[in-house]
Image (cartoon, rainbow, N blue to C red):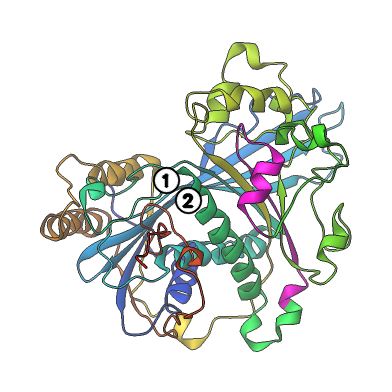
Amino acid sequence: MSLATSVSAKSTTIAQSIAESLRKLPAGHSLSVHVIQTSDHHVESLTPRRRFSHFHSETTMSRRILVLVSQGAVLVAGLEVHEFTSISVQTSGAHVPHLSPSVAVDVCIEKIDTSGFLSTRMPLAKMLVAGYLQSLHRYHVAIAVSTVGVHLFARAQPEYLFAKSQDNPSKHVLDDLALVKWWQSALNYGLQYAVRAGQNSENCTGAAADAVAIAANCMVPGSTASEEASWFLGASQPASNDAADAGRTMGQYTASKLAVATTTASSNASDHASNPGGTRWTWGLPYVSSARAHDCVLQFPDDPMTRLLSEPHSSFWSVSMLLEMLAVSEECGSGRRTAYFSAALPVGRTQGLSSSDKDDGTAEQGTLSFDDYDKVLIALFDREMDFSSHETALASSKRFLDIVSASFGISAIAIDTAGKPIEKSASEPKQQEPPTVNDLTMVVRKKRKVAN
């Protein structure tokens, strides 16, 4: 195993952004954060069978990131992300570039989980997502992109990162629908938090930050638009005066109905007249339904759409045909509720970190090869790992973090939370409390019968 090299500016930016967000949790808690990431590697294109002109060239770089949060000596939360940078160049017949390279950055949130051992219920997972999204401003600084695509496939499972944590009675596991709702809520908050952080909006009025519109999409395979719109508030349902049209699956809507909202105009601008910014949710994928799926649908690792598009007979599928197949697939059909989320996060240069957010020299994070990163995951998923009880979780956490520190030279960042306590409104129904995923520390509470 190779040892971690010197401090990476990019990794400390991720660590600092997450530390900044977690400090906003209710005061009085001490947390530790480990950020483990790889160096950039060449990978296959996210649209490997896309049809280009003969003189087209594309290079895709990938980076994998694992963020782990501990309280005391026990791992309590984790987030795994895959980042992709795609550089496309069109050339003339003489193989001389005649256009500037096109650069796109897309991130896929692959896993998020908690172990159930957080001492106090608070929105740790939501703030972890928000801090990571804030860190994406680094791409504007590095390669001057104006937006970063954020993508995820939400699928309920009892555990993702912490083995046997489903047997921990303190861990709350969300069902399919609750998971989808939690992700919509977490992304809605995280995207707006990231925009405000990029504008240093704590020192400005809310109007300046709210003027930025964030285009976001959600699609639940096999569900109709009317069903989806009834699950969430603040989402745009494709308009139609035709009752039959309202019952179509989202993949069958036309491009105009799935148009991405912008800050100046959108197909549903009147719905947002009182709030020109914020997150604008549209049901459906951000692709033209009649387009060839291989030409536009991004194919991320370990994704049901990627597996379907790997079939030889998928070559001529349209986006709507892909969604029809997805709705009856083993992973998304048979009564299961899964969801695809995507958003275009505006990124810009931050206006500097506060003194408490500057690197104090203790946050030396490693940059690993893909092989060493896989070794980290193997250690985390080792069959001896056990988060079913506090005693076994303590031993498992120590074992894993010792490997991370000794073998890869990755140390923790200490964080003391300093936020306001969570205020509970007596008039607020319990079922409206912010949910979370797989006990992502603010789980949806099931409505209980109350005795008269």
Q: Residue at the location (48% across, 87% down)?
A: 355
Looking at the picture, how far across and down is residue 451, in whole percent?
Answer: 34, 65
Which residue in the structure is indicated by mark 2? 178
Q: Secondary structure at mark 1?
A: loop
Mark 1 surroundings: few (<14), some (14-19) or many (≥20) residues within 10 A:
some
- Mark 2 belongs to which amino acid? Ala
- Is residue 240 at least partly visible in the picture? yes
In the image, which residues are magenta? 209-233
**Which residue is at a point 87% across and 52% down the rendered structure image?**
267
User: Which label number is shown at residue 140?
Assistant: none
Q: Nearer the viewer, residue 194 or 322?
A: 322
Magenta region includes residue 357: no
Circle 1: residue type? Asp
Residue 418 image point, x, y percent: 40, 85
Q: Position of residue 411 (x, y in %)?
A: 29, 66
Looking at the rendered structure, the secondary structure element under dot 2 is helix
Q: Residue at x 75, y 79 (%)?
A: 208
Q: Is residue 414 above or below residue 44?
A: below
Is any part of residue 284 visible from this angle?
no
Image vertical order of residue 86 relative to residue 279, above or below = above
Is there CB contact under 8 Å for labels 1 and 2?
yes
